[in-house]
Every structure is written in structure tokens, then in C-alpha cells.
Amino acid sequence: MKNPASTSWSKRINARSIREFATKNAIILVLAALVLVIGIVKNGFLTPDNLVNIMRISSVRLIIALGAAGVLISGGVDLSAGRTVGLAAVVAASLAQRPDYASKIFPNLPYMWVIVPILAGIAAGLLVGIINGLAIAYLKVPPFIATLGTMVIVWGAASLYVDRPPLGAQPIGGLRTDFTNLGTGSVGFMPTIILIALIVYCIYWVMLNKTQLGKNIYAIGGNLNAAIVSGVNVKKNLVTLYAIAGMLYGLGGVLLSARSGGATNNYGQSYELDAIAASVIGGVSNMGGIGTVAGVLTGVLIFEVLNNGLVVLGISAYWQQVVKGVIIVAAVAVDIRKYSKKR
Amino acid sequence: MKKIVMLFLVAALVLSVGGCAKKAVVTPKIGVAIYKFDDTFMSYVRNQIQSAANGKILLSVQDSQYDQPKQNDQVDQFLVEGDTALAINMVDPSAVSVIIDKCKTKNVPLVLFNREPVAADMAAWDKVYYVGAKAQQSGTYQGEIVAEYWKAHPEADLNKDGILQYVMLMGDPSNTDAKYRTEFSIKAIEAAGIKVQKLAEDTAMWDRVKGQEKMAAFLTANAGKIEVVLANNDDMGLGAIEALKAAGYFKNGKYMPVVSVDATPPALDALAQGTLLGTVLNDAVKQGQATFDLAYALATGAEVKSDVAPLALADGTVDSTGKYIWVPYVKVTKDNYKDFLAK
């Protein structure tokens, strides 16, 4: 991956090289420090069960954050991420209810292969992504406004979807175990949800680093005019990018409902902000053109280690918010030094 | 001269039309305004009011769309139409004095329901009534379910210290329901002569996913020590159950009592599955029935009484001069959940 100074420190170990290493990998050191400090203060934190649990939670967040990070790298922003997660969650959950469950959204729901609700959720996300892409690329609506619009539309759509007579809006429950196994089961020793996230992570890494689409996304985000002049089809690339992001939010929603065993129209609320924050913590520039998938993973892990760790430590709900905010700003402040040093 | 004659003619016309309109509305009619139609609970209440009125009296039911000025206009319209009683579900209960004044001027009795105004406003006129549930009771009933279970199952005291160790999942801490449920559930357990110890308390903002994540962290911090889980609503309780399942509960004889509030369809399903110990229902049907009975009696000049609950004072004391009807919550457990499944 793009790592311009990767040869300078590897030969000699001295004070300067350590400092350089620390600056360049600051964000990973922040994560390691967090894990260590919380682990020392509260000895239950570093148990395999808890770490696997954090990774399960991070899996959904990582998939969503990858979609949001790609958009950030292209110089855009996607505010519809969270609500799209919610739409996909209710769509998938509504098709995965047990036949004997008393209050099904679709009372006459036939038994379907488990792949149907999964694909339906992803398709819902894809649809939102395509709308975002078309509005941004062809109607020239600024990404912030276009996705703000779809965010509101999608929230309305998800609410309308669950608000069916005779029962009215209500949480969706009673999901089939073959569906919830996506979120709670394992393949061998590997939790399924973590495996899926790893696969998505690898595919996304290849897409950003080894394909023309990935190169174009960096080019568009780095310098739009230069990209146009050098013959990049900006419109086509943007639609593809937002569509892929939408699919990832859709998959995230599917996995979220599978992991929690239900869904409401409020699922995914404000996840877009968490995803953007995790991306930026992980070194993705909110101005576009810069960012790595490894950084996004680190950012997500910092977020979820904090979310879990602060509760494990027994810190009050209000203080959790304050501490989280401070650490987010501090982490980025430390990380940003690697760019300012270069000047 | 001509103009003055015209003026008289017009005035006479207007007056006669007005007179006709007044004479036309001799049949009693009730005006109902609901703070917003897309609130699930209120739509149950509204359905009951409408079906209770069917064939007995004319109703006009309006959606105030979460807009207090709009509701004021609707009240004006009801009074102009000559309704003989109003049943109003306030958008903003603190703005009730304006509506009471309007009704007092026209001497049209007013039934407020579900969203409670302060006692001082209620005292402003003797023909204003309130129908609702006492939020404290939902907590009390939760505590009673726990206390009953605890006394019947000595093995629930895992460490045999005679003290009930619990964790609490709170809703939005700024919400009065969340505060009352948290406070009164514990008070009821203590009132049953059981000593309690709080291991952890945190807000999951009414949300299933957050409930799951917080519960997982509680389990990490207090492995093997938690004896009871209390949640302010079903969504969080069901999230906690998912976290417990992931930690190996609800199989091979490993059990954890979880209680919540709302009796949503997924919660009833969990009762059937034996994972949820109990939940508490805010009885929308009885609330609608009591509201209608009272408004009907007032509209037709019949004796003011209710079969749902006796007239009471603001503190719940039964008193024939009372202006409050406190609709009781209902405890829902494995024994009676079938009564609440959707028809």
C-alpha cells in the first residue's frame, strides 16, 4: 500500500527511527495502548470471549465503514449509510421470520432459502447506492446534500415498510436460526460474521489497490480536474463506487439484524457518523484522495474497543460520551503529525 | 342607505345560517385529536376508541401531526362544529391551559389522555379529566415479577449471599419513563423484603443492538455474578437475551431471569421460547375504552364513571370527586402471554 517512507527506518534502530516509527504508526499504538490500559485495569477485558465479542461487533461496523471510507477517498461523503443499514435490516428481517412466529410482517410468508433475505437486504442497499451515485454524478447534487436527502427518504421508506396494518409499526422479531447463525454461528472455530467481514475486507483491499476503479477513486478524490483531463470516466466510476458502498451498508444491515436477532426502523441510526469518524481516525482524509483499508480497520477497532471498554470499566453513560469524544480528537491529532512532518 | 340595507341583509343571512348550524348539531358528538398517528401505541388506543364508538355516537378523529398549534386549530374546529365533549391527546401537555380555556368558554367537557398535564392545570376547571397509566407502576410490576421468581427459585441466588445482584439497562436517561422504571422496579424488589446490589447500570437508549452490546460488556465485567437482568423496554431486554445466548445461557440448564416492559410481539415470542421471564403491558385497549367511556358519559350527560378503573385523584387515591382514571398496567409472563398475541 502507499507508504512512501517505508525503507528509511528498517535498517538501523535508534532513537530517531523509533520516533519515526511511532509517528507513522501512531494510530495502531493508540489502539494497542487502549487495549493494554483497559486490560490492566479490568482483568476480564482481555479474555478471548470478550475480544471475540468486540470483533463480532466490529465486523458489522467495518463493513459499513469500508463503504463510507471509499466515498470519503473519492472526495465525497455518504450520510445515508446509517439509515440504509436500517432499511436493509428490516427488509432482511421481514423475510427471515419463523413460519410459526405469531406476528409476522408478511402473514403468508412462504419458507424461502436463507439466501433470499440476505440478497434482498443487500439489494435494498444497492438501490439506495445507485440513487446516490446517479444524483451525484449526473444531477450534480453535492454528495453531502444528495446523501442527506436519501438518508431522510430511506428512513421514511424503512418506517413505511414496517408500518403495516393491522399491527402497525413494531419491532421485527422471531427470526429463523439459519438466518441468525450468520451473526451468531461459526464456521469451524471462526465466527461466521468475522469471516464475512474478513472476506469483504480483502475484496475491498483488492478493489482499492489493484483495480482501475480503485486507482480512479484515488484520482478523483485527489484532484478531480486532473482525473477528468487524464481521461477518467468520473460519472461511471462514482455511480459504481456509491453502488458498492450501498451494497456494503446493505450487507451490514443484514448482519446487524442477524446478530441481534431482530430489527426496527431505528436500526443503524447515526452509524454513518461512527463510520466517518472511524475512517478519519484511521487516516482517511475527509478532503479525499488519502486513506487505506488497514487504517479503516484500525479506526473501527479503536471505536469498538472504547465502546466496550468504557462499559466494562463501569464508567457512567454520560462520561463515556465525553471520554470517547476526547480520545477521537486526540487520536486524530496524534495521527495527523505524520503528514505535517513531511512538509 | 342601500349599503346599510345590504349590510343588514348580509348580517341577517349570516346569523340565520349560524342559527341553523347550531340547531343542526343537537346529536352529541365527540372530537378526538391524537398527538400523532404514527405512534404505534396511540394507534392501538385510537382503534379502540373508534370501535367502542361504532354505532353509539359520532366521532371526529384528527391527527395533530406532532404539532401543538395544529391541535389548537383542531380543537377550535371541534368547538365550532358543536361537539359535546372532546378527548384530546396533547402534543405538548404543558400547553394544555389554552385548550382548557377554550373548552371552559364553550362549557364543553374535556378528557385528556395518555400525555399527562401537571396537576395545577388540571385544577383550573372542574370539567377536565385525565385518562392514562402511571409510569411508576410499570417499574413496580417488573420488580414484583422478579421478586416472585426470586422467592420461588432459591437457586437463582448464585453466590448464596442472600442478596440479589442485578444489572440494569436504562432507556434514554432524560426520559421520565426510563427513570421511573429504573427506580420503582428496584423499590418493588426491596419492598418484597429482598436485599439488592447493583452490579452495573447503563443506558442502551431503548435500542436492541445497544442492549446486546452493553449486556455483553456487563457479562465481561461481572462474569458469573449477575443474577437478574432488568431492562426498561423489550427491545433492550431482547438484545440482552441475545448477548446471554452468545455467552451460553438458555441452554443446558443455564438460565438468567430477564424482565422488560412493553409486551411487543417479539417479547411475547421470547416468553413463549422461555428466554424472557416477564414483561409489562401498557394496556392500550383499556386506555382507549376508558377514554371513550368517560367522553361518552360527558357528551351525553350520563353519570361519570368507568369500568376500567375507578375515578381517582392525581396520586392514585380512589375518590368519587376524582378527575383521573389510572389504567392499570398488566404483568405478562409465560402464564398469560397468549392473551396478548395478535388476533
Image (cartoon, coloured by chain):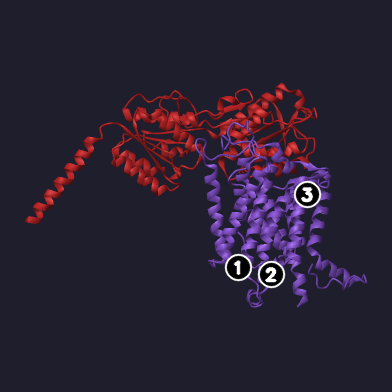
State the separation of the CA atoms marked 1 and 2: 11 Å
The numbered mark, 2 or 3, whose residue comes first in the sequence reads: 3
The N terminus of chain A lies in quadrant:
bottom right
The secondary element bearing badge 3 is classed as: helix
- Occupied quadrant, residue B273: top right
Instruction: Identify the chain of the residue marked 1, using the numbered disc in the image.
Output: A
Identity of the amino acid at label 3?
Leu
Which residue was labeled with disc 2?
A: A216
Residue nearest the viewer, comparing A119 with B3:
A119
Label at residue A195: 3
Residue A68 can be seen in this image: yes
Please state if A275 lies on the left or on the right of B85 as rendered: right
Is disc 3 surrounded by few (<14), some (14 to 19) or many (20+) residues within 10 Å?
A: some
Identity of the amino acid at label 1?
Lys
Residue B277 in the image: state x and y as whole percent.
Answer: 67, 29
- Note whether B286 is above or below B120 in the view shown: above
Which chain is rendered purple in the image?
A
The C terminus of chain A lies in quadrant:
bottom right
Residue B206 in the image: state x and y as whole percent.
Answer: 61, 42
Which residue was labeled with disc 1?
A: A235
